[in-house]
Image: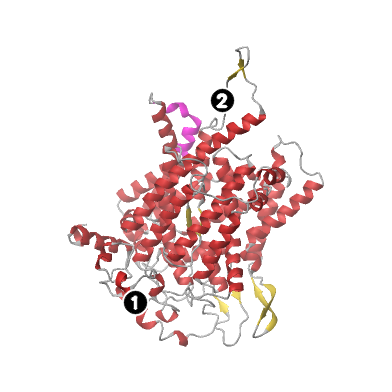
């Protein structure tokens, strides 16, 4: 295990400028992190594990890049960033770096657009899927812009979060007739006629999908308000006192387990193409992990030369999709796939939806508020989204600290974390406003790319936001992406869902897994989360209160694996005796603790401050606002635990000692 060095928060302002020049040049970057600190996940340090380190290790693994060797000029120190947070590259480099970050997450946006169409019974509507993709890209860009400029102000990408959709896909199995359209019309003789024109059926299906989308939008707006209030009031510190990895891991793992059914819907169209896609992604990302691709580059100082860069690892999923798409095209032209639209293998063809998608989509699509109509309320949707937003909050906190480490800046102070959570809530509201079927969250792989490229510029992520917002209005381009064959998406989903499950398990590092208490709590939560939804699906008639509306609500709640699993896990974890260290909560409450020396910071805590006039910054009332820095507290003392800061600010408001809260 590599040695780690702690830092006193008081050194942040005083020490990092003085010792910057003393660092030694290293040609090999340890893992994907550019700090002189590495982490051995097999041997956790006693009492010093933190969610920050867990998340950093998670991001390394999710990026799949073990070591990177970079040729550099003699004056270039590879342990330093090429562009710091506050620096802006030249325009052509800015576009290149922004495009690279955008390509990293394009595949996930595409997948969630198609899954969103499945949730609203519109999986055959290519036009709607293209519109959903455009809305998702627009909201992703807008959310990233908000986060980078007035949110946490770290270089973070805000992308579509699949945890909002997966519970709804599981609920769909409980309501097999949810997509049925019951039509009754009378002919000229007054007799009942069941004949409905194809055009009329399309209109009815569109109305059904629109109504379900309105329910998603209403749920997103409600949970977005709750999300924003948690950040605005600093309540995240209170949540961290009761919710830890023993509660969160079973909840998230249930998402991954129930993800199998929608994945099967894509993969079963053609298993050879599905397995080929997954194999290509695994080979590029893992089997060739130590192979560095030679890439020709040109620089003003050294002219044309060859550098070695793990390009195939960074874009493994994207490359696998492109290669498999080409293979599917060859098989389609050779007559290897059925041409019967009613056969399940038809959607493996590359021409299954492309013509319809291009013909039905406009050249330009402009998302605007209320595009699908006024939002509606649905209890099952709200509960599913509420659990997803709490998971998103806890996951984002760890990402903030990992991003700070990658960017060579001090850990984010409490006000920056609260402001980031507040901004994410606003972005979730905007998701519902502009027609996206999912909320947004911080993406770990894009943080890992900062360590690879050594570019932490805030301007790069602003460029990423602009690129996505521009792509969102190109309707024909979205239609082309939507036409990707289903088994190609199935293979990509197998890899991504598998990594998702593995990363979820990595959050157990601070938990004492030798404790029978912890094992019993997590095992019971998983079993309840699997059995109860299966019971509701198999014996729906058992829930009969005499009120149809109450029955529907109960089926929605109990059929959601996250609801039943998380409630049991939280209840048992907080009622069965156990120390905070044993439960892993002590580590999560100390997320601001950093092992990075002050000498390794390239910028100070000023990167987290919103550029405001000095008179506004000095207003004494800011001490009551959790997402703004307290002007009465020196900079060096602002970095403290989220839970203690929540108590401190609450004591300001109701004037009681911290010990009584």
For mark 1, does the 10 Å Cα neighbourhood hold few (<14), some (14 to 19), or many (20 or more) residues?
few
Residue 173 or 183: which is nearer the viewer? 183
In this picture, is 594 found above or below 188?
below
Rendered position, 188 above or below 548: above
Quarter of the image where the C terminus is located:
bottom left
Q: Which residue is mark 2?
A: 182
Residue 474, image quadrant = bottom right
Foreground: 475 or 407?
475
Q: Give the residue at the far left of this rendering.
A: 656
Q: N-terminal of the two: label 2 or label 1?
A: 1
- Residue 226 shows in this picture: yes
**Residue 270 seen:** no
**Predominant SS of the magenta segment:** helix
Task: Name the disc covering residue 230, or none.
Answer: none
552 lies above or below 415: above
Task: Name the spot of residue 618 as percent of width and height, x first.
Answer: 28, 71
Task: Name the secondary structure under disc 2.
Answer: loop
Residue visible at 31% across and 70% down?
617
Q: Which mark is residue 8?
A: 1
Q: Which residues are magenta?
A: 530-544
């Amino acid at each position: 295990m590599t040695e780690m060095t702690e830092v006193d928060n008081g050194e942040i302002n005083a020490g990092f400028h003085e010792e910057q020049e003393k660092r030694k040049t290293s040609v090999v970057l340890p893992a994907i992190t550019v700090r002189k600190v590495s982490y051995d996940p097999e041997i956790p340090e006693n009492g010093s594990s933190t969610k920050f380190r867990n998340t950093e290790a998670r991001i390394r693994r999710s990026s799949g890049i073990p070591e990177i060797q970079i040729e550099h000029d003699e004056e270039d120190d590879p342990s330093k960033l090429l562009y710091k947070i506050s620096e802006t590259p030249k325009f052509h480099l800015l576009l290149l770096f922004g495009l690279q970050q955008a390509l990293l997450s394009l595949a996930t946006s595409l997948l969630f657009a198609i899954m969103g169409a499945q949730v609203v019974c519109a999986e055959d509507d290519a036009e709607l899927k293209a519109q959903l993709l455009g809305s998702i890209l627009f909201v992703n860009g807008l959310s990233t812009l908000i986060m980078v400029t007035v949110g946490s102000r770290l270089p973070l990408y805000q992308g579509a979060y699949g945890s909002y959709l997966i519970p709804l896909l599981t609920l769909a199995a409980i309501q097999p007739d949810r997509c049925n359209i019951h039509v009754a019309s009378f002919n000229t003789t007054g007799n009942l006629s069941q004949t409905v024109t194809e055009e009329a059926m399309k209109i009815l299906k569109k109305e059904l999908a629109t109504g379900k989308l309105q329910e998603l939008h209403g749920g997103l707006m409600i949970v977005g308000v709750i999300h924003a209030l948690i950040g605005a009031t600093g309540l995240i510190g209170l949540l961290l006192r009761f919710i830890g990895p023993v509660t969160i891991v079973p909840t998230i793992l249930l998402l991954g387990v129930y993800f199998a059914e929608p994945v099967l819907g894509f993969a079963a169209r053609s298993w050879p193409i599905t397995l080929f896609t997954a194999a290509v992604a695994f080979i590029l990302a893992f089997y060739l992990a130590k192979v560095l691709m030679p890439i020709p580059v040109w620089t003003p100082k050294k002219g044309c030369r060859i550098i070695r860069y793990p390009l195939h690892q960074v874009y493994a999923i994207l490359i696998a999709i492109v290669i498999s798409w080409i293979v599917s095209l060859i098989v389609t032209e050779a007559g290897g796939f059925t041409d019967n639209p009613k056969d399940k293998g038809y959607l493996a063809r590359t021409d299954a939806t492309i013509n319809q998608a291009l013909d039905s989509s406009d050249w330009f699509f402009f998302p605007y508020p209320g595009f699908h109509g006024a939002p509606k309320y649905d209890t099952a949707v709200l509960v599913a989204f509420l659990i997803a937003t709490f998971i998103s909050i806890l996951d984002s906190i760890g990402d903030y600290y990992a991003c700070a480490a990658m960017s060579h800046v001090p850990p984010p102070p409490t006000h920056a974390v609260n402001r980031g959570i507040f901004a994410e809530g606003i972005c979730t509201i905007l998701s519902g406003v502009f027609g996206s079927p999912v909320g947004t969250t911080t993406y770990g792989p894009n943080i890992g790319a900062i360590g690879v490229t050594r570019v932490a510029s805030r301007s790069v992520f602003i460029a990423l936001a602009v690129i996505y917002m521009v792509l969102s209005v190109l309707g024909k381009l979205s239609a082309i992406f939507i036409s990707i064959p289903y088994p190609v998406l199935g293979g990509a989903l197998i890899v991504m869902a598998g990594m998702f499950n593995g990363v979820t398990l990595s959050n157990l590092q601070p938990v004492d897994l030798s404790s029978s208490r912890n094992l019993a709590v997590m095992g019971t939560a998983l079993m309840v989360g699997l059995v109860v939804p299966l019971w509701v699906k198999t014996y729906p008639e058992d829930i009969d209160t005499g009120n149809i509306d109450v029955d529907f609500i109960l089926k929605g709640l109990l059929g959601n694996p996250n609801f039943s699993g998380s409630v049991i896990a939280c209840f048992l974890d907080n009622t069965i005796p156990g120390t905070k260290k044993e439960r892993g909560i002590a580590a999560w409450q100390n997320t601001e603790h950093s092992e990075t020396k002050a000498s390794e910071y390239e910028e100070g805590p000023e990167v987290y401050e919103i550029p405001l006039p000095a008179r506004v910054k000095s207003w004494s009332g800011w001490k009551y606002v959790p997402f703004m820095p307290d002007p009465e507290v020196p900079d060096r003392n602002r970095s403290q635990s989220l839970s203690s800061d929540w108590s401190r600010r609450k004591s300001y408001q109701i004037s009681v000692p911290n010990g009584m809260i």
